[in-house]
Amino acid sequence: GENVEQHPSTLSVQEGDSAVIKCTYSDSASNYFPWYKQELGKRPQLIIDIRSNVGEKKDQRIAVTLNKTAKHFSLHITETQPEDSAVYFCAPRYGNKLVFGAGTILRVKS
Amino acid sequence: DTEVTQTPKHLVMGMTNKKSLKCEQHMGHRAMYWYKQKAKKPPELMFVYSYEKLSINESVPSRFSPECPNSSLLNLHLHALQPEDSALYLCASSQEVGRGTGELFFGEGSRLTVL
C-alpha cells in the first residue's frame, strides 16, 4: 500500500543550526523521492528531489539522502535562516502519483 | 512562463449552488492535477489528467466533476457541496504522469467556503 510517515511533526531550531526531517515509505514506492516546501498562505514548491539510483543530492544549503534498504529518505537543511520557516512535505511517487507525508512544521528562531 | 494560474482565488457558495474552479498552464505540460488541502494537512490528490484523459480518480464524490477541455486548461465543476468540502483547492501540472522530472508546479489555489 501507500504508507508515508514523516517525522518530526514540528521542529524548532535556532538560526544557523541544522535541521533534519525524515520520511519513511512503504515497499511499493517507485523511483522518485521529492521534498516540497509550503510557506504560510503560499503554494507548495519543490525544493529538492532524488531518484533511486542516487544516494545523496545537494543544492547549496539543502541536501537529500536516500536509504533504499531501510526505505527512508531525509531532508537536511544546514545554516538555517528565518526564511526556511515553513511546512515541509515529502512526497514519494507511487505509480503515477505522489503521496504526500503529513508534513513537518519547521520554525527557525532568530 | 512557469506559472499555473487558478481562478477564482476565493469562492463562497451555498450548498445548492453550482460553480466552477479554473486552472491554466502554458508550460506544455501533459499532466494536470486537482488536489484538496485542508488547514494544517497535506495536499490530498483528487484527480489526474494525462493527455487530456482522466487517468486517476481517487474515489472523489460525484459532486466534484473535473473537465479538461484542452491541454492547457483544467476545470473543477462543483455542485451540491457540503460544508466539509470547504478547503483550498490546488491545481498542479507536470511534464507527464509518472515520468520526466516528476516536478509538480502548483497554482496558488482557490479557497472555497461552503455555507
Image (tube, helix red, strand yellow):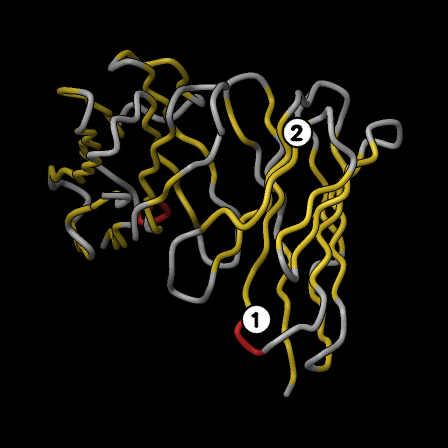
Dot 2 amino acid type: Arg
Q: Nearer the viewer, mark 1 or mark 2?
A: 2
Mark on residue A51? 2
Direction bottom: furthest residue? A110
User: In this rendering, would A39 be left or right of B50?
Assistant: right
**Label 1 secondary element:** loop
Residue shown at 65% from the left, 35% from the top? A50
A38 w.r.t. A4: above or below: below
Mark on residue A1? none
B96 w.r.t. B26: above or below: above
Badge 1 is on which residue? A85
Q: Which mark is first along the chain, 2 or 1?
A: 2
User: In this rendering, would B60 be left or right of A74?
Assistant: left
Direction right: furthest residue? A69
Q: Position of residue A28 (x, y in %)?
A: 71, 18
Q: Quadrant of the N terminus of chain A?
A: top right
Residue shown at 42% from the left, 37% from the top? B104
The answer to which image quadrant residue B105 occupies is: top left
Compare residues B101 and A26 and report the one nearer the observer: B101
Compare residues B42 and A74 and report the one nearer the observer: A74
Residue shown at 78% from the left, 35% from the top? A55
Dot 1 amino acid type: Ser
**Chain designation of label 2:** A
Residue shown at 23% from the left, 25% from the top? B65
Compare residues B114 and A101 and report the one nearer the observer: A101
B109 w.r.t. A12: above or below: above
